[in-house]
Image: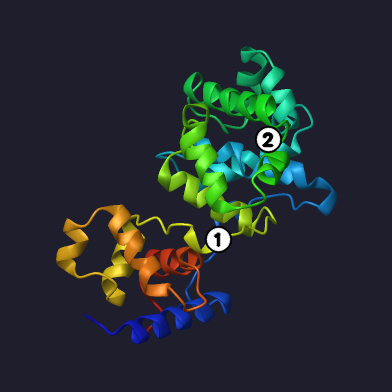
Amino acid sequence: MIEKEIIIDNCRQLLIAYKNGKLGQTIMPEDSNPGFSPAQQEERLVYFTLPMALNYQRDSYKLWQSVLQTYKDKKTKKVFSIKESALLEEQPLREMLLKYKLALQPNKHIATWHKLSKTIHKNWGTVEKMIESVDSDYLKLKQIIQKDYKKDFPYLSGPKIFNYWSFIISTYGMVDLKNREYIEIAPDTHILKCSERLGVITQEEANKLSKEEISQKWRDLFSGSGIDPIDMHAPLWFWSKNGFIFDL
């Protein structure tokens, strides 16, 4: 197993390479957004929250292109209001979400969007107030979404989507999350390849360990390093996706 200090140094190099554009194409799916002013914080949070629950087994780039089209259309933009979405009848909501293929499943996706909107509207009023209610603390947010109200947050309460959503709202949503270092890095195919390549796990562990155990290894690795595990998600993902064109 490669020494911890060497792995951390390699990760620092990857972070720098990512920032300097040396990993290849590094446009994130969520870069497909209109840009928001500080006064549009709630709209910004809804934009990066509700669509996340529809991002299951589909092309993320196409999803976020559809999100942007839906937002830019004055006739469909209202779905990015928690109150409007919560109070809308099912059919008009369906028509708006299907117009630009933000929703692909005419029943399930609409039900998910409706449920999330109703849950947030009923308990907090807005996404912004929901986050404020837990003092912008990742661990407290995890408690309410993954435990206290788990059934009321379809898909968003799932470990992979919840952690990635937490990363997105802290990166794109301008939320200064406390305890951000506890956001798990989700070991998808690309992260697994990088984990093995860097020496965080062995080939045998890649086939044997659970995703939770692999995430724990990343957290243990970065303990005290000043790097939050989730900060490595994009660099690792693009490093693998672009065929490891950057040499360490």
The disc labelled 1 sits on which kind of residue? Arg
The total number of labels drawn is 2
Q: Quadrant of the N terminus?
A: bottom left
Residue 102, placed above or below residue 178: above
Q: Is residue 158 above or below residue 95?
A: below
Q: Earlier in the sequence, mark 2 or mark 1?
A: 2
Determine the residue positioned at 60% across, 36% down. Answer: 50
Q: Position of residue 206 (x, y in %)?
A: 21, 62
Q: Can you give x and y, in whole percent of width and height, for residue 7 in the image?
A: 35, 81
Q: CA–CA distance between discs 2 and 1?
A: 30 Å
Give the left or right position of residue 64, taking residue 210 as reference.
right
Residue 99 in view in this figure: no
Tag on residue 180?
Answer: 1
Q: Which residue is mark 2?
A: 70
For label 1, the crowd category at 10 Å Cα-Cα, with few meaning under 14, some 14 to 19 and many 20 or more, is some
Q: Is 132 above or below relative to 213?
A: above
Mark 2 belongs to which amino acid?
Answer: Thr
Foreground pick, 23 / 87: 87
- Answer yes or no: is residue 79 visible: yes
Q: Nearer the viewer, residue 151 or 190?
A: 151
* Viewer-closest of 127 and 80: 127
Which quadrant of the rendered structure holds the C terminus? bottom left
